[in-house]
Image (cartoon, rainbow, N blue to C red):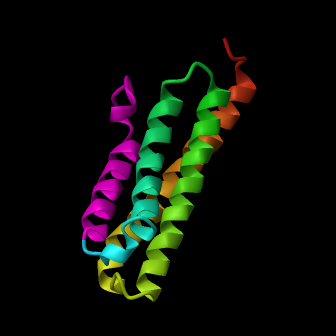
Protein backbone atom coordinates (compact mmCIF):
# COMPACT_ATOMS: atom_id res chain seq x y z
CA UNK A 1 0.00 0.00 0.00
CA UNK A 2 1.51 3.31 -1.06
CA UNK A 3 1.63 6.41 1.10
CA UNK A 4 -0.91 9.14 0.38
CA UNK A 5 1.06 12.28 -0.41
CA UNK A 6 -1.66 14.31 -2.08
CA UNK A 7 -5.44 14.46 -2.30
CA UNK A 8 -4.96 13.15 -5.86
CA UNK A 9 -3.75 9.86 -4.34
CA UNK A 10 -7.08 9.34 -2.56
CA UNK A 11 -9.27 6.78 -4.33
CA UNK A 12 -12.37 8.58 -3.07
CA UNK A 13 -11.21 11.76 -4.81
CA UNK A 14 -10.45 9.83 -8.01
CA UNK A 15 -13.91 8.26 -8.00
CA UNK A 16 -15.42 11.67 -7.25
CA UNK A 17 -13.68 13.09 -10.32
CA UNK A 18 -15.18 10.29 -12.42
CA UNK A 19 -18.60 11.08 -10.97
CA UNK A 20 -18.20 14.81 -11.68
CA UNK A 21 -17.19 14.07 -15.25
CA UNK A 22 -20.25 11.84 -15.69
CA UNK A 23 -22.52 14.54 -14.29
CA UNK A 24 -21.20 17.06 -16.80
CA UNK A 25 -21.76 14.61 -19.65
CA UNK A 26 -25.25 13.63 -18.47
CA UNK A 27 -26.45 17.17 -17.89
CA UNK A 28 -25.22 18.31 -21.31
CA UNK A 29 -28.35 16.60 -22.67
CA UNK A 30 -30.78 18.23 -20.25
CA UNK A 31 -33.31 20.74 -21.59
CA UNK A 32 -31.95 24.27 -22.03
CA UNK A 33 -34.65 25.47 -19.62
CA UNK A 34 -32.73 23.61 -16.86
CA UNK A 35 -29.38 25.25 -17.61
CA UNK A 36 -29.57 27.65 -14.65
CA UNK A 37 -31.46 25.34 -12.32
CA UNK A 38 -31.10 21.56 -12.12
CA UNK A 39 -28.13 21.33 -14.50
CA UNK A 40 -26.26 24.03 -12.60
CA UNK A 41 -27.15 22.55 -9.21
CA UNK A 42 -25.99 19.07 -10.20
CA UNK A 43 -22.71 20.32 -11.58
CA UNK A 44 -22.04 22.45 -8.51
CA UNK A 45 -22.77 19.55 -6.17
CA UNK A 46 -20.49 17.22 -8.13
CA UNK A 47 -17.65 19.76 -8.11
CA UNK A 48 -18.23 20.40 -4.39
CA UNK A 49 -17.71 16.73 -3.56
CA UNK A 50 -14.17 16.56 -4.95
CA UNK A 51 -13.29 20.15 -4.03
CA UNK A 52 -14.08 19.59 -0.36
CA UNK A 53 -12.16 16.32 -0.26
CA UNK A 54 -9.16 18.15 -1.70
CA UNK A 55 -9.52 21.19 0.55
CA UNK A 56 -9.93 19.06 3.65
CA UNK A 57 -6.83 17.03 2.82
CA UNK A 58 -4.88 20.28 2.54
CA UNK A 59 -5.96 21.55 5.96
CA UNK A 60 -3.79 21.55 9.05
CA UNK A 61 -5.88 19.55 11.47
CA UNK A 62 -7.95 16.38 11.52
CA UNK A 63 -10.91 18.38 12.78
CA UNK A 64 -10.80 20.66 9.74
CA UNK A 65 -10.43 17.64 7.47
CA UNK A 66 -13.50 16.07 9.10
CA UNK A 67 -15.45 19.27 8.56
CA UNK A 68 -14.69 19.33 4.83
CA UNK A 69 -15.44 15.62 4.46
CA UNK A 70 -18.82 16.28 6.09
CA UNK A 71 -19.50 19.02 3.53
CA UNK A 72 -18.48 16.62 0.77
CA UNK A 73 -20.89 14.03 2.17
CA UNK A 74 -23.70 16.59 2.13
CA UNK A 75 -22.97 17.53 -1.48
CA UNK A 76 -22.97 13.84 -2.38
CA UNK A 77 -26.44 13.27 -0.94
CA UNK A 78 -27.61 16.46 -2.66
CA UNK A 79 -26.34 15.14 -6.01
CA UNK A 80 -27.88 11.73 -5.45
CA UNK A 81 -31.25 13.39 -4.80
CA UNK A 82 -30.89 15.46 -7.96
CA UNK A 83 -30.12 12.35 -10.02
CA UNK A 84 -33.25 10.68 -8.62
CA UNK A 85 -35.28 13.80 -9.47
CA UNK A 86 -33.83 13.71 -12.98
CA UNK A 87 -35.21 10.19 -13.38
CA UNK A 88 -38.64 11.29 -12.18
CA UNK A 89 -38.61 14.23 -14.59
CA UNK A 90 -37.54 11.84 -17.37
CA UNK A 91 -34.39 13.81 -18.10
CA UNK A 92 -32.38 10.69 -17.28
CA UNK A 93 -33.25 7.04 -17.77
CA UNK A 94 -32.87 4.57 -14.92
CA UNK A 95 -30.28 2.70 -16.97
CA UNK A 96 -28.21 5.87 -17.53
CA UNK A 97 -28.49 6.69 -13.83
CA UNK A 98 -27.15 3.31 -12.67
CA UNK A 99 -23.45 4.17 -12.89
CA UNK A 100 -23.61 7.62 -11.25
CA UNK A 101 -25.90 6.30 -8.50
CA UNK A 102 -23.55 3.38 -7.92
CA UNK A 103 -20.64 5.80 -7.67
CA UNK A 104 -22.62 7.93 -5.21
CA UNK A 105 -23.16 4.86 -3.05
CA UNK A 106 -19.51 3.83 -3.21
CA UNK A 107 -18.18 7.33 -2.53
CA UNK A 108 -20.62 7.68 0.36
CA UNK A 109 -19.33 4.49 1.96
CA UNK A 110 -15.74 5.63 1.46
CA UNK A 111 -16.41 9.04 3.00
CA UNK A 112 -18.13 7.40 5.99
CA UNK A 113 -15.14 5.11 6.50
CA UNK A 114 -12.69 8.01 6.24
CA UNK A 115 -14.67 10.08 8.71
CA UNK A 116 -14.93 7.20 11.19
CA UNK A 117 -11.18 6.52 11.02
CA UNK A 118 -10.28 10.20 11.31
CA UNK A 119 -12.56 10.62 14.33
CA UNK A 120 -10.95 7.63 16.01
CA UNK A 121 -7.45 8.87 15.19
CA UNK A 122 -8.20 12.39 16.42
CA UNK A 123 -9.29 10.97 19.77
CA UNK A 124 -6.00 9.08 20.09
CA UNK A 125 -3.60 11.88 19.14
CA UNK A 126 -3.89 15.59 19.85
CA UNK A 127 -3.78 18.00 16.91
CA UNK A 128 -0.53 19.95 16.41
Give 86 or 39, whichever is nearer the viewer. 39
Using the image, determine if residue 12 lies above or below residue 105.
above
Q: Which residues are magenta?
A: 1-28
Indicate the position of residue 26 as horizontal and vertical percent values: 28, 69
Indicate the position of residue 109 as horizontal and vertical percent values: 52, 56
Give 78 or 114, whichever is nearer the viewer. 78
Q: Is residue 59 magenta?
A: no
| Residue found 48% across the figure and 24% down from its top | 58
Using the image, determine if residue 11 lies above or below residue 65.
below
Give 29 or 71, whichever is nearer the viewer. 29
| Residue found 63% across the figure and 27% down from its top | 62
| Residue found 47% across the figure and 55% down from its top | 45
The quarter of the picture where the C terminus appears is: top right
Q: Is residue 25 magenta?
A: yes
Q: How many marks?
A: 0
The quarter of the picture where the N terminus appears is: top left
Amino acid sequence: MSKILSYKDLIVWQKGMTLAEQVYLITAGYPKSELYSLTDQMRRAAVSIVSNIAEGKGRESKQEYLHFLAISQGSLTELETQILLSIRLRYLSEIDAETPLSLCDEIGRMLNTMRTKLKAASQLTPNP
